[in-house]
Amino acid sequence: MRMIVSALCAIGICAAAALSPAQAQQQWADIDCASSKITLPNAIECQQGPPVVSNNCSFEQFSAYAGANTPRVFAKLLQVTDLSRCWIDKSNDIEDTMRGISYTTMGNATDWSKPRIFLAGQVSSFDTLYHDHREECAGFIQYGHAHLGGFDYTVRGFVCAAPRHHLSDADIETAIKSVQLR
């Protein structure tokens, strides 16, 4: 995963740093969805990730998963904790960022489409196997509010249609709009 984060230095110079694979894969803790900063309707699992520190900026991470009902939806929040001098940039490699959203997109996703503009970000369709059934899915990245030289948060995730069902743009939009930030 390559999410680019930037910090406005004290002398007004911008510096960029990529999250290392070690930072991206550190242990996530299960939390009550009521205390998560991101959730979904019917969420069955929520987690808080380790804090990320880059260029003297801190970022917090949360995720939510709603898989009991179809469509399956996963969403991950990366949020700036110090808004006075820090922001999140768009990735230089959106395809790589899409593929690094979760274990589903990293290891089991095939037939990726080219990313396209969708709502306040981008989407890319892919196929995956879930319980031995092929699913049509879409990875998404949505950008938060414009802040300094970038954004105050990003939401990355995916949505998958029920096995043997088609995933429409309306389904993708509904899933993205169902993500709730607190």
Image (tube, grey):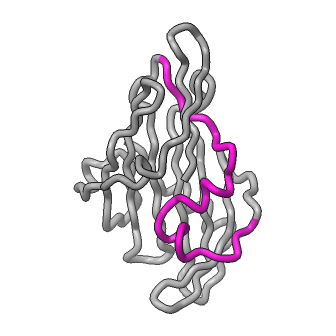
The answer to whether residue 86 is magenta is yes
Q: Which residue is drawn at 65% across and 76% down?
A: 110
Q: Where is residue 53 in the image (x, y as percent from the top left)?
A: 40, 33
Give the quadrant of the C terminus: top left
The answer to whether residue 182 is magenta is no
Viewer-closest of 144 and 104 = 104
Q: Which residue is drawn at 42% across and 77% down?
A: 69
Viewer-closest of 72 and 51 = 51
Residue 145 visible to an observer of this rendering = no
Q: Residue at x 54, y 77 (%)?
A: 108
Figure quadrant of residue 68: bottom left
Q: In this view, does 122 lie above or below 160?
A: above
Q: Where is residue 160 in the image (x, y as percent from the top left)?
A: 55, 74
Q: Which residue is drawn at 54% across and 64% down?
A: 158
Viewer-closest of 1 and 171 = 1
Figure quadrant of residue 39: bottom left
The region drawn magenta spans 85-113
Considering every residue shown, the one lying at the far top of the view is 11
- Taking 68 as reference, is 107 left or right? right
